[in-house]
Amino acid sequence: MQKTEFKAESKRLLEMMIHSIYSNREIFLRELISNASDAIDKIYYKALTDSNLTFEKGNYYIKIGVDKPTRTLSILDTGIGMTREELENNLGVIAQSGSLSFKRENEAKDGHDIIGQFGVGFYSAFMVADEVTVITRALGSDTAYVWKSSGADGYTIEPGQKDAVGTEILLKIKERTEDDNFDEYLDEYRLRSIIKKYSDFIRYPIKMDVTRQRPKEGSEGEFEDYTEEQTINSMVPIWRKNKNELTNEDYEAFYMEKHYGFDKPIKHMHIRVDGAVSYNAILYLPETTPFDFYTKEYEKGLELYSNGVLIMSKCPDLLPDYYRFVKGMVDSEDLSLNISREILQQDRQLQLIAKNIKNKITSQLQNMLNDEREKYEVFYKAFGTQLKYGVYSDYGSNKDTLQDLLLFYSLKEKKMITLDEYVSSMPEGQKYIYYATGETYERIEKLPQTELVVDKGYDILCFIEEIDEFAIKMLMNYKEKEFKSVASGDLGIEADEDKEQTEQEAQENKALFDEMKKILGDKVKEVRISKRLKNHPVCLTADGDLTIEMEKVLNAMPNSQQVKAEKVLEINSNHSVFQSLRAALEQDQEKLSLYTNLLYHQALLIEGLPIQDPVDFTNDICKIMV
Ligand SMILES: Nc1ncnc2c1ncn2[C@@H]1O[C@H](COP(=O)(O)OP(=O)(O)OP(=O)(O)O)[C@@H](O)[C@H]1O
């Protein structure tokens, strides 16, 4: 059967190319500079095999020029140039990449630094220019050619004049419109910043005449403008340098220069990986929490470079959410870029890099925790909450990675400790890891519920952040030790004989507790005798999985379902208040009601829970005063 070839309407194709491939117009300069750099690289690669050719790096450069009166932006390079035939093939055929063919032909000779591969980047010039002129003279040729096009209606090629080998591209920048300010591409400062942003690590100097000021000779206090040729790009990426050559200051300077943060990084990681996937990365742990860190405005991500050319300013796929505080960059030659060189297709390489980076960050944090505890605690102060969110989110799937990085304040040690440190110093017989929740460490220390656990000589982890208890519930246990709130129904401490005694006392006082429960109604599930209290008369605890602290947090959320913990009012039978309650039960019902309400409200206050009717409460206090 005869096969018919697809035809393409090249004008339409070009239109589509110009208007739909790139979402960001400023990248046209990146594309043209990358082409210029490729053209110089090609001489370099040719010289490797051609003994008649020498490559003196110092002779090669790219120059950006602006002529405002004619609205012309020029990009000149001293690269390999193009013959007439190459002009036809490379700039006359969309999606024909001379660079890719060159790379393939030179594969054996390590042509991996060549950037171009799709054969479309050049046309991005039409996003900002009405007319594009290419004046080029190929290496080894005396004749220059001029290629000219205004976009979709085609192009012309004519012989022309050019003194040196290389290519000059002239863009006639579009007129400014109401919606689009094309003038910015004639503005020296703006051009410099685009070059810095995308092409800072192109290996050849990108030069530009820069306007500067100097004191005017002969007239004091007056200044005059003058122009000076400057190299705009840094050329050698810091991540390609040897670690031994770099100092802390160099890394800090890079952090500042890249605006990763306003602070100083607390730690940097310089990673070089060669293997199934190759990449270089410099990652930083900032010292302070960015002001917008916990808002939706904060964007996580690392800068992503391919061959030293910026592809994405914030690539979110490189970092898991729980390490979203990490800043820095990744450069890899192995990425499969899509045609716009802006977004990556679901890339296996990228996933491998991300996994690798995640592991590196984890071990860096672990090392810091082990070897530089003070530093780690500074870091933890800034980003510990994020780690705890990490444990909680994704149904706890990252808890194994993160649990050993957590720190909590120890009531006994009066300092931050890890879960491992807690478990290692548990006395024999202690079954659970105890924790208490409260607003501050000081308040937790005074909580009646802690009395029995402290009395036993057990340590208590203090939870003062909302996420703490949720994260711990997700962990469930650590090294086979379950977590237990000091306010939970059964602390797992009481000896059997104590339990018996409690049981007996409970029986004897059943009438009292039933009456108190009746007075409080459904505010509590039960009123019962307490064995955890030593000095305080009363406290609130919760039966079941939902603790009082969790009830507080969940109910404070917008659109909350208003959950209810099963609250239990515990009474200390050794406290003298208990005798007053018993007496009131026998002699004065009204008094019993007053005392019960007062005790219940006291327990609420201690828990940091709101009192439903503060006026009633204060009236009750007055009643016992008169
Ligand atoms: N300054 C230049 N000097 C020499 N050749 C050039 C120059 N600019 C473009 N070319 C040639 O034109 C071809 C097409 O360029 P274009 O930018 O469209 O695509 P590319 O660079 O190959 O690929 P990509 O779309 O990935 O950038 C290049 O492959 C190269 O052969």
Image: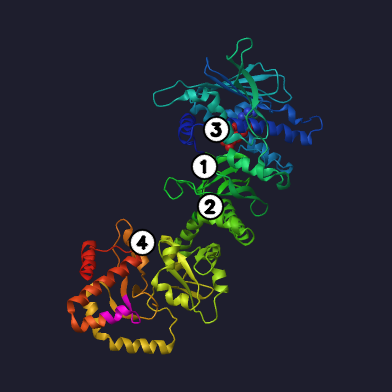
Task: Identify the residue at horizontal 27%, vertical 73% (top origin).
Answer: 524
**Amino acid type for the residue under numbered disc 3:** Ile
Residue 288 part of the magenta segment: no
Residue 387, position as x, y percentages in the image: 50, 58
Quarter of the figure that contains the C terminus? bottom left
Mark 1, other Cα within 10 Å: few <14 / some 14–19 / many ≥20: few
Q: Residues within 10 Å of mark 3 (few under 14, many from 20)?
A: some
Instruction: Give the SS element for disc 3.
Output: loop
Q: Is residue 432 above or below residue 369?
A: below
Q: Residue beneath label 1, please?
A: 3
Instruction: Identify the residue at horizontal 63%, vertical 45% (top origin).
Output: 333
Q: Is residue 4 above or below residue 531?
A: above
Residue 553: give its label: 4
**Left-right relation of 54 to 541:** right
Q: Residues in magenta?
A: 569-580
Mark 2 element type: loop
Total residue callouts: 4
Q: Foreground mark, 4 or 3?
A: 4
Q: Residues under labels 2 and 3: Cα distance? A: 36 Å
Residue designated by label 2: 319
Q: Position of residue 613 (x, y in %)?
A: 22, 63
- Residue, disc 3: 94
Disc 3 to disc 1, how far (Cα)? 23 Å
